[in-house]
Image (spheres, helix red, strand yellow):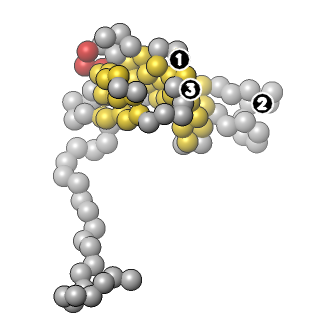
Amino acid sequence: MGRRLEVYLVDGEVRDVRLDGESLWPTWFKIEWKETGQRSAKIRGERLSTNYGDEIVILHEAPTGPGGSQDGSRTAMARPAAAPPAGPRSRAPRPVGPAGSTPH
């Protein structure tokens, strides 16, 4: 309880993941958005949940170079993580061929 997970993105790619200020990148992690708006995460066996007072923050950093800041520094902008739309998932139908055939 009271843990903080920060995920830093640059141009939509993960650049760092920090748990309570300690960089754990590169490592496997996952974040789940719940239907209630709560988020949960798991990283290195640690489980976090906004439901129990933990913070799960995604920070979008401005890219350097063209379009970045003039001095080349990066600015972190916290954006609220939007929950995906609720409802059943739609999947495209898989192609089905005649019995015994293999798709190419």
Which numbered tag is attached to residue 72? 2
- Residue 78 visible within the image: no
Q: Is residue 103 left or right of residue 12?
A: left
Nearest the viewer among 25 and 33 is 25
Q: Earlier in the sequence, mark 2 or mark 1?
A: 1
Residue under numbered circle 1: 22
Amino acid on which disc 3 is placed: Met
Residue 66: give x, y in percent of width and height: 76, 42
Helix, strand or loop under label 2 = loop
Question: What distance separates the C-alpha of mark 2 from that of mark 1?
Answer: 24 Å
Q: Kindly give the residue lying farthest to the top in the view shown.
A: 2
Residue under numbered circle 3: 77
Residue 63 quadrant: top right
Q: Earlier in the sequence, mark 2 or mark 3?
A: 2
**In this view, 95 is above or below 86:** below
Helix, strand or loop under label 1 = strand
- Depth-wise, is mark 2 or mark 1 nearer the camera? 1
**In this view, 101 is above or below 54:** below
Crowding at mark 2 (Cα within 10 Å: few <14, some 14-19, many 20+): few
Which residue: 24% across, 81% down?
96
Nearest the viewer among 46 and 90 is 46
Amino acid on which disc 1 is placed: Glu
**In this view, 2 is above or below 73:** above
Residue 46 quadrant: top left
Which residue: 26% across, 73% down?
94
